[in-house]
Protein backbone atom coordinates (compact mmCIF):
# COMPACT_ATOMS: atom_id res chain seq x y z
CA UNK A 1 0.00 0.00 0.00
CA UNK A 2 1.25 3.46 -0.95
CA UNK A 3 0.44 6.78 0.67
CA UNK A 4 -0.77 8.84 -2.27
CA UNK A 5 -1.65 12.49 -2.83
CA UNK A 6 -3.75 13.69 -5.75
CA UNK A 7 -3.68 17.43 -6.41
CA UNK A 8 -6.89 18.31 -8.22
CA UNK A 9 -8.72 15.22 -9.42
CA UNK A 10 -12.24 16.60 -9.29
CA UNK A 11 -13.27 16.15 -12.91
CA UNK A 12 -12.90 14.21 -16.16
CA UNK A 13 -9.65 12.21 -15.85
CA UNK A 14 -9.52 12.74 -12.07
CA UNK A 15 -12.33 10.40 -10.97
CA UNK A 16 -10.89 7.58 -13.10
CA UNK A 17 -7.54 8.08 -11.37
CA UNK A 18 -9.14 8.13 -7.92
CA UNK A 19 -10.92 4.84 -8.66
CA UNK A 20 -7.67 3.17 -9.70
CA UNK A 21 -5.85 4.38 -6.60
CA UNK A 22 -8.58 3.14 -4.29
CA UNK A 23 -9.03 -0.17 -6.10
CA UNK A 24 -5.47 -1.06 -5.13
CA UNK A 25 -6.14 -0.28 -1.46
CA UNK A 26 -3.89 2.76 -1.23
CA UNK A 27 -4.02 5.44 1.44
CA UNK A 28 -5.36 8.44 -0.50
CA UNK A 29 -5.38 12.17 0.23
CA UNK A 30 -7.00 14.61 -2.21
CA UNK A 31 -6.07 18.29 -2.20
CA UNK A 32 -8.26 20.66 -4.20
CA UNK A 33 -10.63 23.60 -3.92
CA UNK A 34 -13.44 21.47 -2.58
CA UNK A 35 -15.06 20.62 -5.88
CA UNK A 36 -14.76 16.87 -5.39
CA UNK A 37 -17.57 14.62 -4.23
CA UNK A 38 -17.02 13.30 -0.70
CA UNK A 39 -18.78 10.01 -1.42
CA UNK A 40 -15.51 8.09 -1.35
CA UNK A 41 -14.95 6.25 1.94
CA UNK A 42 -11.57 6.33 3.65
CA UNK A 43 -10.32 9.27 1.60
CA UNK A 44 -8.83 12.33 3.26
CA UNK A 45 -10.02 15.57 1.66
CA UNK A 46 -8.01 18.73 2.20
CA UNK A 47 -9.61 21.88 0.86
CA UNK A 48 -7.20 24.47 -0.44
CA UNK A 49 -6.12 26.60 -3.37
CA UNK A 50 -2.76 25.46 -4.70
CA UNK A 51 -1.90 29.06 -5.57
CA UNK A 52 -1.80 29.75 -1.82
CA UNK A 53 0.71 26.98 -1.23
CA UNK A 54 0.60 23.61 0.54
CA UNK A 55 1.15 24.57 4.18
CA UNK A 56 -1.59 22.13 5.26
CA UNK A 57 0.54 19.25 3.93
CA UNK A 58 3.92 20.25 5.39
CA UNK A 59 4.06 17.56 8.09
CA UNK A 60 3.10 14.71 5.76
CA UNK A 61 5.16 12.41 3.56
CA UNK A 62 3.73 10.81 0.41
CA UNK A 63 5.08 7.88 -1.55
CA UNK A 64 3.49 9.18 -4.77
CA UNK A 65 2.03 12.54 -5.77
CA UNK A 66 -0.19 12.90 -8.84
CA UNK A 67 -0.34 16.54 -9.92
CA UNK A 68 -3.28 16.82 -12.29
CA UNK A 69 -3.60 20.60 -12.47
CA UNK A 70 -0.23 22.38 -12.68
CA UNK A 71 -0.52 25.01 -15.39
CA UNK A 72 2.71 26.98 -15.00
CA UNK A 73 6.22 26.65 -13.67
CA UNK A 74 5.49 28.45 -10.42
CA UNK A 75 2.81 25.92 -9.52
CA UNK A 76 5.13 23.00 -10.24
CA UNK A 77 7.96 24.59 -8.26
CA UNK A 78 5.65 24.96 -5.24
CA UNK A 79 4.97 21.22 -5.29
CA UNK A 80 8.69 20.46 -5.43
CA UNK A 81 9.51 22.89 -2.62
CA UNK A 82 6.59 22.41 -0.26
CA UNK A 83 5.53 18.74 -0.45
CA UNK A 84 7.59 15.84 0.88
CA UNK A 85 7.36 12.93 -1.57
CA UNK A 86 9.30 10.07 -3.14
CA UNK A 87 7.85 10.21 -6.66
CA UNK A 88 5.84 12.75 -8.66
CA UNK A 89 3.60 12.13 -11.68
CA UNK A 90 2.92 15.28 -13.69
CA UNK A 91 -0.17 15.45 -15.91
CA UNK A 92 1.42 17.13 -18.90
CA UNK A 93 0.25 17.70 -22.45
CA UNK A 94 1.25 17.55 -26.09
CA UNK A 95 0.79 21.34 -26.05
CA UNK A 96 4.13 21.74 -24.29
CA UNK A 97 6.09 20.83 -27.44
CA UNK A 98 7.65 23.51 -29.62
CA UNK A 99 5.97 24.03 -32.97
CA UNK A 100 7.31 21.70 -35.63
CA UNK A 101 6.48 20.33 -39.06
CA UNK A 102 8.37 17.09 -38.49
CA UNK A 103 6.18 14.20 -37.33
CA UNK A 104 5.63 12.13 -35.35
CA UNK A 105 6.63 14.15 -32.31
CA UNK A 106 8.81 12.09 -29.99
CA UNK A 107 9.48 12.53 -26.29
CA UNK A 108 12.91 13.86 -27.23
CA UNK A 109 11.40 16.64 -29.39
CA UNK A 110 12.04 20.16 -28.06
CA UNK A 111 9.78 21.68 -25.41
CA UNK A 112 8.72 25.23 -26.21
CA UNK A 113 6.09 27.41 -27.81
CA UNK A 114 3.36 26.24 -30.18
CA UNK A 115 1.46 29.45 -31.00
CA UNK A 116 -1.97 27.83 -31.33
CA UNK A 117 -1.68 26.43 -27.81
CA UNK A 118 -1.44 29.94 -26.35
CA UNK A 119 -0.84 30.55 -22.66
CA UNK A 120 -1.87 26.99 -21.81
CA UNK A 121 0.95 25.49 -23.87
CA UNK A 122 3.42 28.10 -22.65
CA UNK A 123 2.60 27.39 -19.01
CA UNK A 124 2.77 23.62 -19.41
CA UNK A 125 6.15 23.97 -21.13
CA UNK A 126 7.32 25.90 -18.06
CA UNK A 127 6.21 22.97 -15.87
CA UNK A 128 8.27 20.56 -17.95
CA UNK A 129 11.39 22.72 -17.72
CA UNK A 130 11.06 23.07 -13.94
CA UNK A 131 10.76 19.29 -13.57
CA UNK A 132 13.72 18.62 -15.84
CA UNK A 133 15.93 20.80 -13.63
CA UNK A 134 14.57 19.57 -10.31
CA UNK A 135 16.73 16.48 -9.64
CA UNK A 136 13.56 14.85 -8.30
CA UNK A 137 12.18 11.47 -9.32
CA UNK A 138 9.22 12.08 -11.61
CA UNK A 139 7.27 11.05 -14.69
CA UNK A 140 5.47 13.37 -17.08
CA UNK A 141 2.59 12.09 -19.20
CA UNK A 142 1.87 14.14 -22.33
CA UNK A 143 -1.55 13.26 -23.77
CA UNK A 144 -2.88 14.45 -27.08
CA UNK A 145 -6.50 15.69 -27.26
CA UNK A 146 -8.47 13.86 -24.54
CA UNK A 147 -12.03 12.65 -25.17
CA UNK A 148 -14.64 10.88 -23.06
CA UNK A 149 -17.81 11.33 -21.00
CA UNK A 150 -18.04 14.48 -18.84
CA UNK A 151 -15.41 16.23 -20.93
CA UNK A 152 -15.09 19.73 -19.46
CA UNK A 153 -13.49 20.83 -22.73
CA UNK A 154 -16.34 21.45 -25.17
CA UNK A 155 -15.28 18.91 -27.78
CA UNK A 156 -17.65 16.00 -28.41
CA UNK A 157 -20.52 17.99 -26.91
CA UNK A 158 -19.83 20.90 -29.30
CA UNK A 159 -19.84 18.76 -32.44
CA UNK A 160 -22.77 16.55 -31.48
CA UNK A 161 -24.85 19.59 -30.52
CA UNK A 162 -24.31 21.16 -33.91
CA UNK A 163 -25.13 17.89 -35.65
CA UNK A 164 -28.30 17.16 -33.69
CA UNK A 165 -29.60 20.72 -34.05
CA UNK A 166 -28.84 20.74 -37.78
CA UNK A 167 -26.55 23.74 -37.41
CA UNK A 168 -23.60 24.46 -39.67
CA UNK A 169 -20.22 23.23 -38.45
CA UNK A 170 -17.49 25.65 -39.44
CA UNK A 171 -14.38 23.55 -39.87
CA UNK A 172 -11.17 25.62 -39.98
CA UNK A 173 -9.44 25.60 -43.34
CA UNK A 174 -10.29 22.52 -45.35
CA UNK A 175 -10.15 20.31 -42.26
CA UNK A 176 -7.58 18.01 -43.83
CA UNK A 177 -4.90 18.10 -41.14
CA UNK A 178 -4.44 14.98 -39.02
CA UNK A 179 -4.80 14.58 -35.27
CA UNK A 180 -4.74 11.83 -32.65
CA UNK A 181 -7.02 11.34 -29.70
CA UNK A 182 -6.98 9.45 -26.42
CA UNK A 183 -9.71 8.73 -23.88
CA UNK A 184 -9.87 9.93 -20.29
CA UNK A 185 -9.81 6.46 -18.72
CA UNK A 186 -6.72 5.57 -20.77
CA UNK A 187 -4.91 8.69 -19.56
CA UNK A 188 -5.79 7.87 -15.95
CA UNK A 189 -4.54 4.30 -16.36
CA UNK A 190 -1.20 5.50 -17.77
CA UNK A 191 -0.82 8.07 -14.98
CA UNK A 192 -1.51 5.45 -12.35
CA UNK A 193 0.85 2.80 -13.74
CA UNK A 194 3.68 5.31 -14.02
CA UNK A 195 3.17 6.32 -10.39
CA UNK A 196 2.50 2.87 -8.97
CA UNK A 197 5.68 1.50 -10.50
CA UNK A 198 7.64 4.76 -10.05
CA UNK A 199 8.73 4.78 -13.67
CA UNK A 200 10.73 7.90 -14.45
CA UNK A 201 10.72 9.78 -17.73
CA UNK A 202 8.55 11.63 -20.23
CA UNK A 203 5.84 9.78 -22.16
CA UNK A 204 3.53 10.70 -25.01
CA UNK A 205 -0.01 9.38 -24.69
CA UNK A 206 -2.32 9.04 -27.68
CA UNK A 207 -4.16 6.49 -29.78
CA UNK A 208 -2.68 4.63 -32.73
CA UNK A 209 -4.97 6.14 -35.36
CA UNK A 210 -4.86 9.47 -37.18
CA UNK A 211 -7.97 11.25 -38.51
CA UNK A 212 -8.65 14.55 -40.23
CA UNK A 213 -11.03 17.06 -38.68
CA UNK A 214 -13.36 16.70 -41.66
CA UNK A 215 -13.49 12.92 -41.32
CA UNK A 216 -13.93 13.20 -37.55
CA UNK A 217 -17.08 15.27 -38.05
CA UNK A 218 -18.36 12.83 -40.69
CA UNK A 219 -17.77 9.87 -38.36
CA UNK A 220 -19.57 11.61 -35.50
CA UNK A 221 -22.47 12.42 -37.83
CA UNK A 222 -22.73 8.77 -38.81
CA UNK A 223 -22.61 7.72 -35.16
CA UNK A 224 -25.38 10.16 -34.18
CA UNK A 225 -27.52 9.41 -37.24
CA UNK A 226 -27.34 12.97 -38.54
CA UNK A 227 -26.40 14.70 -41.79
CA UNK A 228 -23.57 17.21 -41.27
CA UNK A 229 -23.84 20.74 -42.61
CA UNK A 230 -20.19 21.57 -43.17
CA UNK A 231 -18.75 24.96 -43.97
CA UNK A 232 -15.05 25.61 -44.48
CA UNK A 233 -13.74 28.56 -42.47
CA UNK A 234 -10.58 29.81 -44.14
CA UNK A 235 -10.32 32.81 -41.82
CA UNK A 236 -9.55 30.58 -38.83
CA UNK A 237 -7.19 28.10 -40.41
CA UNK A 238 -3.99 26.94 -38.68
CA UNK A 239 -2.74 29.25 -35.96
CA UNK A 240 -5.77 31.54 -36.44
CA UNK A 241 -7.96 29.01 -34.64
CA UNK A 242 -11.00 30.26 -32.72
CA UNK A 243 -12.12 27.58 -30.21
CA UNK A 244 -15.56 29.18 -29.94
CA UNK A 245 -16.14 28.23 -33.59
CA UNK A 246 -14.58 24.73 -33.57
CA UNK A 247 -12.77 22.84 -30.79
CA UNK A 248 -9.67 21.77 -32.75
CA UNK A 249 -7.18 23.62 -34.89
CA UNK A 250 -6.50 22.57 -38.46
CA UNK A 251 -2.87 21.71 -37.83
CA UNK A 252 -1.12 18.37 -38.05
CA UNK A 253 -0.33 17.09 -34.57
CA UNK A 254 0.97 13.55 -34.58
CA UNK A 255 2.84 11.97 -31.70
CA UNK A 256 4.85 8.78 -31.36
CA UNK A 257 3.16 6.57 -28.74
CA UNK A 258 5.50 3.59 -28.89
CA UNK A 259 7.42 4.35 -25.70
CA UNK A 260 4.37 4.38 -23.40
CA UNK A 261 2.94 1.24 -25.02
CA UNK A 262 6.19 -0.66 -24.63
CA UNK A 263 6.95 0.61 -21.13
CA UNK A 264 3.50 -0.12 -19.68
CA UNK A 265 2.59 -3.01 -22.00
CA UNK A 266 -0.70 -1.36 -22.97
CA UNK A 267 -2.85 -0.89 -26.06
CA UNK A 268 -5.08 2.07 -26.94
CA UNK A 269 -8.71 1.76 -27.95
CA UNK A 270 -9.69 2.21 -31.62
CA UNK A 271 -11.21 5.66 -32.10
CA UNK A 272 -14.53 5.07 -33.86
CA UNK A 273 -15.82 2.13 -31.76
CA UNK A 274 -15.08 4.10 -28.60
CA UNK A 275 -16.78 7.22 -29.97
CA UNK A 276 -19.85 5.05 -30.66
CA UNK A 277 -19.78 3.67 -27.12
CA UNK A 278 -19.54 7.13 -25.56
CA UNK A 279 -22.38 8.41 -27.75
CA UNK A 280 -24.71 5.60 -26.75
CA UNK A 281 -23.78 5.56 -23.07
CA UNK A 282 -23.41 9.28 -22.44
CA UNK A 283 -23.61 12.00 -25.08
CA UNK A 284 -26.85 10.78 -26.68
CA UNK A 285 -28.75 11.79 -23.54
CA UNK A 286 -26.47 14.40 -22.02
CA UNK A 287 -25.91 17.14 -24.58
CA UNK A 288 -25.66 20.57 -23.02
Image: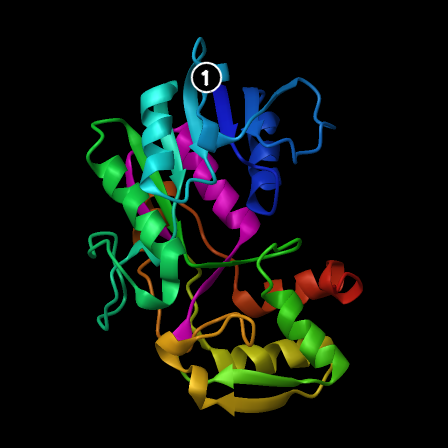
Q: Is residue 182 left or right of residue 117?
A: right
Above or below, 239 against 171 in this view is above
Q: Is residue 86 left or right of residue 160?
A: left
- Give neighbour class at mark 1: few <14, some 14-19, many 20+ (Cα, 10 Å): few
Q: Which residue is mark 1?
A: 55
Q: Quadrant of the C terminus?
A: bottom right
Q: Position of residue 137 (x, y in %)?
A: 28, 27
Q: Can residue 198 be seen in this snapshot?
A: no
Secondary structure state at the residue bearing disc 1: helix
Numbered disc total:
1
Q: Is residue 78 left or right of residue 17?
A: left
Residue sitting at x 30%, y 64%: 114
Q: Position of residue 280 (x, y in %)?
A: 74, 64
Above or below, 3 against 96 in this view is above
Indicate yes or no whether the magenta region holds residue 142: no
Above or below, 23 against 218 in this view is above
Give the magenta range.
Answer: 178-205
Find residue 151 and report its image quarter.
bottom right
Indicate yes or no whether the magenta region holds residue 203: yes
Residue sitting at x 43%, y 66%: 180
Q: Residue furthest front?
A: 52
Amino acid sequence: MNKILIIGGSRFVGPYLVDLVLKDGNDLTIFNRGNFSSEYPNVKFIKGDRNNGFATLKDQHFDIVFDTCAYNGVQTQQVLDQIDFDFLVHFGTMASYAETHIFPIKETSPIGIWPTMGDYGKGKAECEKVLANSHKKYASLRPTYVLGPNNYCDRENFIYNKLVKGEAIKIPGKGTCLNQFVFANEVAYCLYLLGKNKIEGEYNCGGDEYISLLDLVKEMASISGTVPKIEFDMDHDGSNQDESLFPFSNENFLIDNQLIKKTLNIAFEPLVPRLKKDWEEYYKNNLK
